[in-house]
Image (tube, helix red, strand yellow):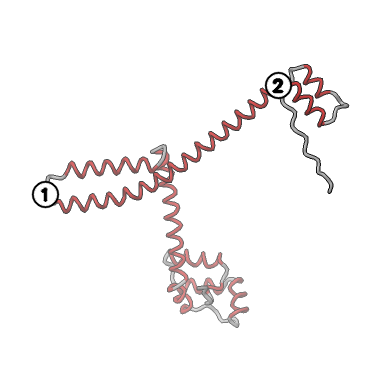
Amino acid sequence: MARTGKIARLPREIRTQLNRRLSDGEKARRLVEWLNTLPEVHTVLQSDFAGREITEQNLYEWKQGGYPEWRAQQDAIARAAELAANATELAEAAPGRMSDHLAIVLIGRYAAELAAWDGSDPDELHRKLRSLRILCHDVVELRRGDHEAARLDMERIRLERDRDKTDQDAADYFARWIEYPSILECIRDPSATSQVRKQRIREILGLPTPPKPAESISP
């Protein structure tokens, strides 16, 4: 829900400065004095609040609403940046598909749990293995997606290779085809129409003449 208080109506840059100073633990009285000296704040207060200045109560209300939202946003941004950095480090440390590495790790955990079990408390072993099975299900889904992407990529490469081969075969065939003097002469004959050229080429290659379309009979 959009906030409508005095501080919520201030420009974003000023709200960001205020939130950072609140995060640094600056006292409310100093912050209120600072806000009320800014020309941008005067403009908003004159326009929307009949010129009434920002008070410590306004700041208290902001600290209960807008400020916690800003803190949450900053935490989310920091977590996202940390995840991105971790993903980069993982990719550098373990080249290849991450899902394959995760599968190897889980297999190792399975082996470790089974090797450490001394035969007592089977319920505890079952609980640990059940947790690993849940993780395995997630990794299987990740690997399925990776393998499908790899399959599509291989199919794309195959199609491109087949297309290139087809184009090359056609070019080679045409190069051999025009070596025949009779065909070359037919192609170069400026007086021959397109239909005549096609007919001559079929005759040279020994291809049957296609039947003429049946003429329509008027009633």
Label 2 vs 1, first from the N-terminus: 1
Q: Residues within 10 Å of mark 2 (few under 14, many from 20)?
A: few
Position of 199 compared to 129: left or right? Answer: right
User: Do the residues bearing badges 2 and 1 touch, measured as CB atoms within 8 Å?
Assistant: no
Three-letter residue code for mark 2? Ala
Indicate left or right for 11 with 28 as reference.
Answer: right
Task: Name the residue furthest right.
Answer: 191
Q: x and y percent of residue 156 in the render?
A: 54, 38
Query: In terms of depth relative to the viewer, which is nearer, 96 or 18?
Result: 96
The residue lying toward the viewer, choosing from 140 and 155, is 155
As helix, strand or loop, the secondary structure at mark 1 comes to: loop
Residue 175 is labelled as 2
Q: Residues within 10 Å of mark 1 (few under 14, many from 20)?
A: few
Residue 216 rendering spot, x and y as whole percentages:
81, 43
Query: Residue 183: x and y, percent?
Result: 77, 21
Residue 120, label in figure: 1
The quarter of the picture where residue 172 lies is top right
Question: Going 74% across and 31% down the picture, which residue do you hit?
Answer: 210
Tell me which residue sits at (44%, 59%) in the image. 76
Q: How many marks?
A: 2
The image shows residue 54 at horizontal and vertical percentages of 52, 77
In this rendering, the answer to whether 87 lies above or below 5 is above
Distance between mark 2 and mark 1 Cα atoms? 80 Å
Closer to us: 148 or 205: 205
- Tell me: residue 108, above or below residue 74: above
Left of 19 or right of it: where is 107? left
Please state which amino acid type lies under the numbered disc 1: Ser
